[in-house]
Structures are given as structure tokens and as C-alpha cells.
Amino acid sequence: MIPAAGGYYREGDNTGIFPSGARIYLRYMQYPQDRFKYQGREFQYIGFDELTHFTEDQYTYLFSRCRTVDPAMVCYTRASANPGGTGHAWVKKRFIDKVPAGSDREAKPKHYLGGPNPETGQWEEREVPPGTPFSSSRAFIPASRFDNQILMKADPNYEGRIRAMSDPLLAEAMLTGNWELFAGQFFTKFRKQIHIIDDLVIKKYWTVGRGTDWGFAHPCVTIWLALDEFGNAYFFDELYQNERSPAWHAEEILKRDLDYHISFAYTGRDTFARNPLAWKKDETPDFMPNSFADSFAEHGVPLVAASQDRKQGWGLMHRMMDWKGEMLQNGSFEFDLTPKLHIVRGKCPHLVDQIQAAVRKEEDPEDIPKTEDDALEAARYALMHLQMDGTVVPMRKKTWNEREIEKLLQIQVPGAGLYEWAK
């Protein structure tokens, strides 16, 4: 390609050089920190091959290197990708979900602008009209093996070799361009058209509860769950927000609790302040006062430590998602085994995204990496109620007398207010 355009390729540094002075640099970013090797550089065109093998930070950081001092030049970034890989989730969210192509496979560009949300102050990206100052356009152009007619004619058995791959999900994704399936996908039985329901009427005799995954820099997530008399589980609401105090979250939780009798409320053990001396003496309490959990309880939302067995939790979700059947010509399903896990449409968007994006740990395929899994963790805490023993703490605020008695029984340690939060 380079000689055909009048240039030559210099193998020593993998650079194409042209008579005009233009150059094509073939470079790498094997690790996330490698992106900083390009700090201070200037490129007018940046291309990524197999984008799902990169992180989103690697991709977007190079936007800052895409620049020119020549007003006649247009700077832009392009990429190719296949479903799968560690970056599957963010590539799908950024392109396939936000700028899907039309039925004719024509690109439908949209424009986006980053900036602080006027209500929350958090940095986010929003769609804006074309021509908005400082906005950038984005498009997704789908392709399949049939678009490469030269390959199909020269190697007609190429499709057969793909079908012989040991990973059937990757094979199907590569053949069909289906971004809902990818190599390493964790919840392989989840399908939106099966597990998402349009509406839910919660009966008074159903068991209702919630799971909370605490976070400050990372989102703090609460997921509401209803359990019916037939063993079905319905996730029907979600609170997802970061950089807010336990008091703020407690207030929002109580607003949503008004219509339900909450029977259980679980959270991770990191919500409780662990006693650093607990490992020394058996009689030393595992947890200390003035934790995040205490702050929740002070504002009327007591929480119970959930099971920390991630593999048991994911296994339970797998079993409840399981289904058997086939799709009929009219698009409906005929089930031999119906799923037990359901999510109300539009009510838990982050949970749905994280279920679809979850991948297997390379070193432990029974678990998922602890990356963006906050909503999944909250849902797991709630669902593990089905396997928890013991009496659930009643959902009520402690009385003034109870709080004062507790204070008298506690030995106040200097600096114990470390985790006190103001509303």
C-alpha cells in the first residue's frame, strides 16, 4: 500500500515515508500506561486495529494527540473491531448502542459533547445538534464476512474454519457481527427479549427487599427485588449515584420504600468498618461503630452484611437465568424451561448493561473481574436472600432511647468519628 502511494517503508522503526513529508507510524499500546508514550505528539489521523483489545482510556487519551497547526487539514480517528475482547463492553456502549446503523447498514452519525451535568456536577457526555461548538461526531458502520468478496471467493471454506472454533459464542459473533454475544461472556443465557418484562404488579404478599453496594468515588447502587410465591425474582428499581453521602442515599431509598414493606436489606461487608484488631483475639468484635452502615442506620436505613461468596451468588444468578426453548416465527418464545429471573424494562438500566458486559476472569472463570460491577454486586446481595439463614433486622429507625443506651455501652475511642458524614 505504501509503495503504491509513492512512499517507502522503513522497517527499523515501522514507519511509512512519502515524498510530501507525510509519514505513517505503526505503533503499539500493549499496556494502559503506554498511552503516555505519545504525550506531546501530534497526529492528524489516528487508527486503531481491533479496538476491543484496548481500554477506553487508551482510546480517548489519544484524542488529545489528534491535532494540527494547518487549518486546511481535518483531524479524525477511525477504528476497526470484532465482538469480544476485554474492551467489548465499552466499544459496544460507545458505538453499537449509541449510534446504531440503520437497517440499510448506512452509518447514522450523531454528535456528542462532554461537560459537567448541571444538576449533579458530574462529567458526562450528551448528544447535541450537529455544528455545536467543540462537539465531535461518531458513527458505527457494520460489516460481515460477506462484505469481503475477494476473501470469500479465494477461500470459500473460511466460514467452516470459524465454525470449527472451540468457542461457539465467539464463532457466532464473528460470523453474524452479533455484539450481544462475545468470547468470555459470563451470563451466556441472558437475553433481553426473554428476561426483560414490560410491567410488574407487586402483590401484597410477595417478599420485597433490596441490596446496596456502597461506593463514593465509584457509584453507590441500590437494587430493589421482589420474590413471588413461585420462586420468581423480579428486579424492579435501581438507585445509581456516586459522590453522595450515606444520608443522601438513605433519604432517596426511603422515598422509594414508601409503597412497599421491605423485608430484607443486604450490603457488602466493606460497608462496615473492620476492626484492625479482630484478627488478634477471638473475643474482639469483627466490626467497629461509626461505619458507613451506621450512618445509613442513623438515617432510617439499617443494613445487614450479605454473604461475600461471589461464586455462589453468580451461580445462583446463572441458575435463575437458565431457560430452554425456541423462538417461533412470530418472534415469541416457546419454553420447555422458563427463567426465574426477570428485570422490569427501563427500571434497572445499569444492571442490564453490566449483566451483558460481564466477562470471565482469565485466572478464575467462575468469577468476574471487579471492574464496573456495582449494580451486579447490589443485585447479588439482594438475590442471596434466597440462601441466607437467620432473622432479618427489621426495617425501622432506632429510637432515641436505644441510641442513648448504645452510646453508654460503647467505649468512645479518640478519632472514632472518622466515618461520620454530614447530610
Image (cartoon, grey):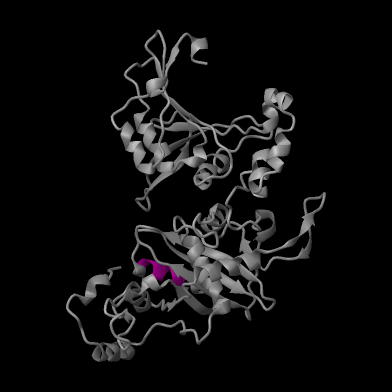
Which image quarter is the C terminus in? bottom left
Q: Which of 379 and 235 is in front in this view?
A: 379
Residue 11 at x, y percent in the picture:
42, 20
Q: Is residue 271 visible?
A: yes
241 to the left or right of 84: left
Residue 266 at x, y percent in the picture:
47, 75
Quarter of the view holding residue 57 = top left
Q: Nearer the viewer, residue 14 or 346?
A: 14
126 to the left or right of 313: left
Residue 112 at x, y percent in the picture:
46, 37
Q: What stretch is highlighted in magenta?
A: 248-255
Check the image and report above or below for 359 versus 35. Answer: below
Check the image and report above or below for 289 versus 222. Answer: below
Queried whether the magenta region covers residue 253, the answer comes back as yes
Q: Which residue is most to the front? A: 12
Queried whether the magenta region covers residue 402, the answer comes back as no
Q: Which residue is most to the right? A: 329
* Residue pictured at 74% horizontal, 33% vertical: 157
Q: Which residue is most to the left? A: 414
Secondary structure predominantly adopted by residues drawn in magenta: helix
* Residue pictured at 23% horizontal, 71% vertical: 418
Quarter of the view holding residue 21 = top left
100 to the left or right of 303: right
Q: Can residue 197 be seen in this view?
A: no
Residue 225 at x, y percent in the picture:
56, 70
* Residue pictured at 53% horizontal, 45% vertical: 85
Quarter of the view holding residue 338 = bottom right
* Residue pictured at 20% horizontal, 84% vertical: 412
